């Protein structure tokens, strides 16, 4: 797989030239790897024994990565010198703190908001003297918007239909279609639950699916975001009756509840003030524990480990007084009256739950944190970085790259009654979202101002579901493993998909623009049942009366959601003629496509 470094070894860059070059070497690549394709079991054993072929491949990859790292280090050094010389011009907003919010006082439709997005992005780029890349072609756009909204690549039939359509509004229409697709809620739910429940040993037996199902239903039903968050923060009952309580089951202590709610829904790192006053922001330790006071009555009925042993569902309740320091509170705990962060101190009835009071304040349109943090988070989900970045570290010393734009998104999100579909629709209909990932002119070094699309690595969920779209659901063959218990153990607690996600999931909090996978993931992809089960897709492409060129084109539509270039088509045709069995050659081509860096990234 050919991967070219843009600014560092961790940052991927994709271009048609790079993708074509990688496929030029397909003959040699397939020749070296074909034994693994046809003998996956032996390949796994060979990996462990470090046979010469695999060792050579690993050595080659390591050498390439070292070379990329060296080049990346040089570029990074140049970037630091450039930033120093320019006074860090690209990290500080060019506008004064007092400005007029674009579209202020009006309720804008999604297209009007899209125009404001483009206006503000262009204004900043013009000020910096950076050129805009052109818009994507239809194939690049369709694959991107499918991954961002539905969490999966489109089928070859959808790609061909879209590419052949002459409808001038087809992009807007496909955005609407995807926002009303059940896969939208599923993709949103998986993205959010991964940020809401920390990956730690106490949660290894926790079933995330009730929360994901609950969130998916809410997003698909068009429930306003403020209501979704209100119901999450006030959730009670057993997990099998209310999936929302999974949120607090996965954050079972007062400090963890406080940390995640403020980070996720307010965009602040308040946990830094748990033990002492915040070192960089004007937050006091007493302010942390004043927010934590809203959770002092919240209880976990039984932890996930005990629940699994007893065969019962864990749950959340809010009754009784708060426990003292010998309970589940850290040594740094302070007992202070509940108070909104840098806000009012509400009157709480000791006989009533506290969380509804917090949730009402948190999700109000007048809350100074919520709408802004949520607008920034959805922007982050679609671009890989927030207008304020990191997305959960919003404070005055970490300003937005485009403050007017963030203010406009925040106001219009509130004006829409926190309509998630409206906000995503506006962003996806903008030229800013639809720009190609190919650099243009001198904008290749821009990674903050949206002059072109920055390539992102597919999430583990997107990668698995996209493989399934290409090859279908692959089940172990009866003769592969005689012991069914071994099969079940290998599949993991959630089946093949969950087993795959655990292996490919990146570290928590890692920048989605950074490539985290390594040689183990690459080898697993090459030798996995999914990657080697291309027969059905190839058979579908080999319809009666189709020419080799048409079959190759269909394979590209299936694997990469685009048609091959003329040069790619020539090379693949040449490879085909050199093989004795056309079906085997077609399988090899599709296998190489789904093991390419182009398949593994969102560009």
Image (cartoon, helix red, strand yellow):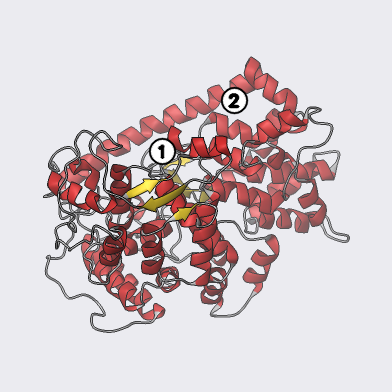
- Residue 500 vs 191, above or below: the answer is above
Taking the image as drawn, is residue 390 in sight?
no
Q: Position of residue 37 (x, y in %)?
A: 73, 33
Badge 1 element: loop
Which residue sits at x=33%, y=71%? 117
Task: Locate residue 283 relative to residue 382 in the image: left or right.
Answer: left
Q: Quadrant of residue 201?
A: top left
- From the image, which quarter does the N terminus lie in? top right
Q: Quadrant of residue 23?
A: top right
- Residue 486 vs 188, above or below: the answer is above
Badge 2 element: helix
Task: Locate residue 523 relative to residue 255 in the image: left or right.
Answer: right
Q: Position of residue 140 (x, y in %)?
A: 54, 61
Q: Nearer the viewer, mark 1 or mark 2?
A: 1
Disc 1: which residue: 10
Mark 1 and mark 2: Cα distance apart in space = 20 Å
Q: Nearer the viewer, residue 152 or 571?
A: 152
Which residue sits at x=55%, y=59%? 186
Does label 1 or label 2 sit earlier along the sequence?
1
Mark 1, Cα crowd under 10 Å, few <14 / some 14-19 / many 20+, is some
Taking the image as drawn, is residue 534 in sight?
yes
Task: Locate residue 138 relative to residue 270 in the image: left or right.
Answer: right
Disc 2: which residue: 57
């Amino acid at each position: 797989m050919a991967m070219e470094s843009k600014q560092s070894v961790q940052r991927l860059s994709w271009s048609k030239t790079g993708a074509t070059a990688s496929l030029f070497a397909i003959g040699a690549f397939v020749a070296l790897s074909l034994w693994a394709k046809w003998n996956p079991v032996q390949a796994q054993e060979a990996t462990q024994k470090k046979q010469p072929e695999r060792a050579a491949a690993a050595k080659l990859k390591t050498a390439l990565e070292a070379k990329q790292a060296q080049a990346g280090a040089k570029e990074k050094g140049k970037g630091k010198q450039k930033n120093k010389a320019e006074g860090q011009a690209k990290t500080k907003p060019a506008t004064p703190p007092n400005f007029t919010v674009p579209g202020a006082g009006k309720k804008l439709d999604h297209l009007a908001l899209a125009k404001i997005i483009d206006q503000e992005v262009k204004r900043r780029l013009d000020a910096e003297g950076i050129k805009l890349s052109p818009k994507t072609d239809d194939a690049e756009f369709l694959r991107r918007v499918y991954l961002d909204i539905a969490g999966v690549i489109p089928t070859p039939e959808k790609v061909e239909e879209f590419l052949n359509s002459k409808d001038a509004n087809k992009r807007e229409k496909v955005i609407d279609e995807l926002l009303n697709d059940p896969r939208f809620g599923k993709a949103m739910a998986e993205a959010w639950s991964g940020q809401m429940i920390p990956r730690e040993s106490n949660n290894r037996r926790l079933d995330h699916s009730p929360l994901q199902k609950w969130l998916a239903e809410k997003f698909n039903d068009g429930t306003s975001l403020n209501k979704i968050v209100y119901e999450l923060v006030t959730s009670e009952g057993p997990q099998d009756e209310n999936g929302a309580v999974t949120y607090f089951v996965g954050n079972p202590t007062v400090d963890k509840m406080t940390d995640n709610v403020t980070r996720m829904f307010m965009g602040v790192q308040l946990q830094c003030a748990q033990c002492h006053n915040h070192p960089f922001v004007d937050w006091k330790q007493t302010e942390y524990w004043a927010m934590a006071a809203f959770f002092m009555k919240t209880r976990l009925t039984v932890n996930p480990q005990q629940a699994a042993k007893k065969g019962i569902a864990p749950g959340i309740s809010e009754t009784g007084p708060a426990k003292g320091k010998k309970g589940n509170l850290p040594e740094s705990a302070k007992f202070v009256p509940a108070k909104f962060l840098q806000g009012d101190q509400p009157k709480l009835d000791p006989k009533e739950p506290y969380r509804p009071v917090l949730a009402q304040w948190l999700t109000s349109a007048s809350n100074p944190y919520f709408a802004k943090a949520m607008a920034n988070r959805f922007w982050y989900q679609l671009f890989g970085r927030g207008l304020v970045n990191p997305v959960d570290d919003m404070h005055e010393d970490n300003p937005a790259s485009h403050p007017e734009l963030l203010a406009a998104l925040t106001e219009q999100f509130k004006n829409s009654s926190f309509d998630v579909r409206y906000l995503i629709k506006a962003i996806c209909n903008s030229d800013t979202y639809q720009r190609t990932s190919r650099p243009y002119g001198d904008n290749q070094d821009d990674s903050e101002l949206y002059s072109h699309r920055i390539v992102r690595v597919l999430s583990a969920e997107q990668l698995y579901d996209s493989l399934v779209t290409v090859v279908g659901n692959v089940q172990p063959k009866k003769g592969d493993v005689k012991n069914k218990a071994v099969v079940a153990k290998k599949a993991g607690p959630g089946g093949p998909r969950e087993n795959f996600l655990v292996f490919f999931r990146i570290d928590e909090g890692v920048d989605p623009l950074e490539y985290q996978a390594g040689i183990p993931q690459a080898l697993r992809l090459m030798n996995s049942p999914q990657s080697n089960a291309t027969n059905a897709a190839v058979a579908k492409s080999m319809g009666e009366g189709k020419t080799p060129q048409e079959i190759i084109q269909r394979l590209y539509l299936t694997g990469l959601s685009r048609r091959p270039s003329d040069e790619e088509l020539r090379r693949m045709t040449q490879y085909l003629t050199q093989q004795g069995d056309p079906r085997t050659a077609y399988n090899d081509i599709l296998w190489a496509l789904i093991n390419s860096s182009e398949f593994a990234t969102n560009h």
